[in-house]
Image (cartoon, grey):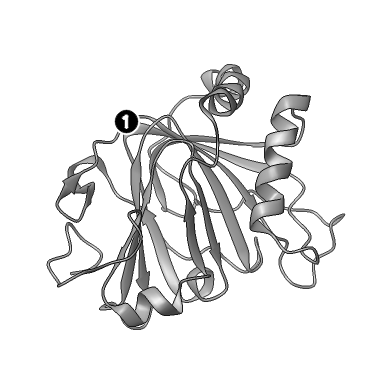
Amino acid sequence: MAGSGRLALRTFPGPGWLRGSGPAVLSRLRDAAVVRPGFLSAAEEETLSRELEPELRRRRYEYDHWDAAIHGFRETEKSRWSEASRAILQRMQAAAFGPGQTLLSSVHVLDLEPRGYIKPHVDSIKFCGATIAGLSLLSPSVMRLVHTQKPGEWLELLLEPGSLYILRDSARYDFSHEILRDEESFFGERRVPRGRRISVICRSLPEGMGPGEPQQLPPAG
């Protein structure tokens, strides 16, 4: 089954950080599911981690999420950043979002403990628009995308610390996405040991929502 454990189907490699169920999926999602390894320098990753740690440390890890999508996590929304972190986020947003896209005003910060994971889900169109982008900090992980109507079609993304991932259009709407738990964390035959993982996630606004309208913390990403 695509949604549980390692996929036993024949796989087709993309770049070193993408693999999928076939060349058609890799081709179709070439611009919709993007990984940019090494997007952050070690110093930039340290800048973000150092700024987030005091706020996250005040929160306890939780094991029940309101939409049952996450296990072993703590999260927050953050809108005030240091000048150095703001410059990093602006560079991320310029790389991931089009000039006509408006972003949710707050950045979603999600902290997974080493045993934590994100279950397969599709972000609600009530909470975000056509593009989701995230920076991965601290630990490598594997993100799996599975077509909601054709579970034999899937894509896996290797997310190393310092990488940027972007999900847009079909990858965002037509595929569920998840972060694999430690015991399932393989990228092909490569074991990807999970540690604590922080993701810094930006989302475009849902279509028709203005930037001043009330916003709720989105589901996992």
Q: Classify 126 as above or below 71.
A: below
Helix, strand or loop for disc 1: loop
The location of residue 134, given as percent across then percent down, is 55, 48
User: Residue visible at 43% across and 36% down?
Assistant: 161
Which one is in front, 19 or 108? 19
The answer to which image quadrant residue 91 occupies is: top right
> Residue placed farthest to the right in the image?
212
| Quadrant in which the N terminus appears | bottom left
Question: How many marks overall?
Answer: 1
The answer to which image quadrant residue 21 occupies is: bottom left
Q: Classify 20 as above or below 114.
A: below
The location of residue 17, given as percent across then percent down, is 35, 54
Q: Which residue is mark 1?
A: 195
The location of residue 128, given as percent across then percent down, is 65, 62
User: Residue visible at 58% across and 18% down?
Assistant: 50
The location of residue 183, given as percent across then percent down, is 18, 43
Quick check: 117 left or right of 2? right
The answer to which image quadrant residue 51 occupies is: top right
Q: Classify 195 as above or below 220.
A: above
User: Residue visible at 23% across and 46% down?
Assistant: 185
Which one is in front, 23 or 207? 23
Structural crowding at the residue carrying mark 1, measured as other residues with C-alpha within 10 Å and reported as few (<14), some (14–19) or many (≥20): some
Q: Classify 114 as above or below 167.
A: above
> Which amino acid is tagged 1?
Gly
